Image (cartoon, helix red, strand yellow):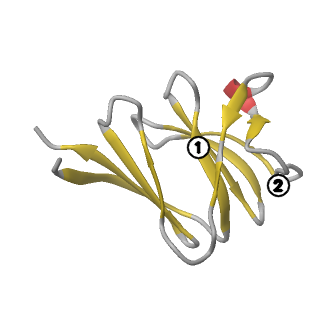
Amino acid sequence: MENYIRKYYIPLGGLTNFGLSDDEKYILIFTHQGCGVIELETGNKIARAVDYMYPEMDIVEGVGPLENQKTRIFPYDFINNLIVFSNDKRYKLIGESSGIDVKKISK
């Protein structure tokens, strides 16, 4: 089993969905307050849209650097943690209502 350590935490209010961009440079996040894009490696906030929330599909167009790009997102069920791995398994993202814990594999 891989050992992951916390890289950073993204505090949120009311997570509803999130996913990684195809190139895995960004996290696309939806909350009850809107949509945002975070740079995966640094945790920097890149873009935000308060008028874009509650996506109806699991593949959506993002905002900012993800505008006009399709990104797969996963719904948070408000009961269990939502866990998403990067394709290479270097990152493990654990979502809960109040935020996303971004972990990176330790070497």
* Residue 54 vertical placement versus 45 (above, below): below
Q: Amino acid at mark 2?
A: Met
Q: Residue at x 73, y 30 (%)?
A: 64
Q: Residue at x 28, y 44 (%)?
A: 104
Q: Measure the alpha-carbon separation of dots 1 and 2.
A: 14 Å
Where, quadrant-wise, is the C terminus in this rendering? top left
Q: Is residue 16 left or right of residue 9?
A: right
Q: Residue furthest bottom?
A: 79
**Dot 1 and dot 2 residues touching (CB under 8 Å):** no
Q: Residue at x 59, y 65 (%)?
A: 12
Q: Residues within 10 Å of mark 1 (few under 14, many from 20)?
A: many
Q: Residue furthest left?
A: 107
Q: Residues within 10 Å of mark 2 (few under 14, many from 20)?
A: some
Q: Is residue 95 left or right of residue 36?
A: left
* Residue 24 vertical placement versus 4 (above, below): above
Q: Is residue 8 left or right of residue 73?
A: left
Q: Amino acid at mark 1?
A: Gly
Residue that badge 1 annotates: 19
Secondary structure beneath dot 1 equals strand
Q: Residue at x 56, y 78 (%)?
A: 79
Q: Residue furthest front?
A: 1
Q: Position of residue 68 (x, y in %)?
A: 80, 22
* Residue 28 vertical placement versus 69 (above, below): below
Q: Position of residue 44 (x, y in %)?
A: 50, 41
Residue that badge 2 annotates: 53
> Which residue occupies the foreground of this view, 2 or 102?
2
Secondary structure beneath dot 2 equals loop
